[in-house]
Image: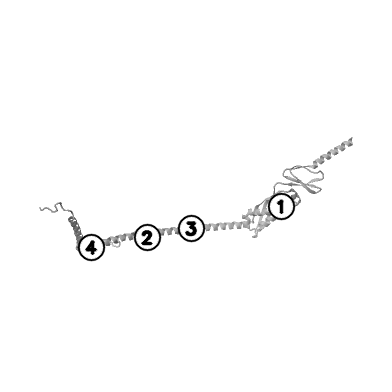
Amino acid sequence: MLGFDIFVLVVVALIVLTIIAGVKTVPQGYNYTIERFGRYTRALSPGLGIIVPFIDRVGSKMNMMEQVLNVPSQAVITRDNAMVQVDGVTFFQVMDAAQASYEVNNLENAILNLTLTNIRTVMGSMVLDELLSKRDDINQRLLSVVDEATRAWGVKVTRIEIKDINPPNDLVDAMARQMKAERDKRAEILLAEGERQSEILKAEGDKQAQILAAEGRREAAFRDAEAREREAEAEAKATEMVSTAIAAGNVQAINYFVANNYVDALKDLAKAPNQKVLMLPVEASSVIGSIAGLAEISREAFKDGSDSAPRGRGGSVPNT
């Protein structure tokens, strides 16, 4: 009986071990590869999986979640022979557990070295200014090259980001001086441009002022010419009237004409700005005679007016 009990216990233990060996629990985010006699047969998805005990075994436990791989700092020589220190980070995700397990040995190390070499290749083909200003282009080129190379490994590289680009200190100082000189240059250009615009506007203003002044002088000259024309017309008309009176034998008209010109001449002499004292040998009898001529003309004018007035209704003045 004792021997039979031992046999039963052994059988039960073997059954329990067989069940344990044949049932596999795969956690979420992982895939297990199954090998039969050392050959890959299938992959177990997350959950409860059944395998043939003692014949099948788990080959590798592959993480199917997106993973982050830090790229260590390395020296890169640019196309213009500037040495910079560059580091970055790579994001990748295993899409096929079998390929990631059996197509490449040490997947993470392979991706890391592939990223390092391509960083040197891509950044070494650029000058320093492009390296500092076109980081997005660098990331895109690295992602395209590395993702294409790792596709055969069942891996999808989702992002590659350059974290730091550190030029040497002397190069940083030179860049700072260059930037300061460039800013000073732009400031001087802007100042010169402002002065140029100011001079242009000032010249334009002077031009407009001169044009307006010329327009004003032209208008004034036109008005003066018009006034002189009217004055000449009036003078010609007066001269014509006087000439008609002289032709008719009117002596008073001659006296009026001479006296009027005489008085105008005296007035012009008196208004001269360079004359403070006016001393002329004027004969009083000539002046009085001229004035008498003016008075005679006035009396003749009044007499003609009274003769032309209407007489009484009887047509004769009664004798007193």
Question: Splitting the image into 4 quarters, where does residue 295 fall?
Answer: bottom left
Instruction: Name, please, the residue furthest toward the left.
Output: 320
Q: Which residue is mark 2?
A: 218
* Amino acid of disc 4: Thr
Is 194 placed left or right of 32 in the picture?
left
Q: Which residue is mark 4?
A: 244
Question: Does dot 4 land on a helix, a strand or a loop?
Answer: helix
Q: Measured from the top left, where is residue 73 in percent x and y?
A: 68, 53
Q: Which residue is mark 1?
A: 151
* Amino acid of disc 3: Gln
Q: Earlier in the sequence, mark 1 or mark 2?
A: 1
Q: Earlier in the sequence, mark 3 or mark 1?
A: 1
As drawn, the label of residue 197 is: 3
Q: In front: mark 4 or mark 3?
A: 4
* Amino acid of disc 1: Arg
Q: In front: mark 3 or mark 1?
A: 1
Q: Earlier in the sequence, mark 4 or mark 3?
A: 3
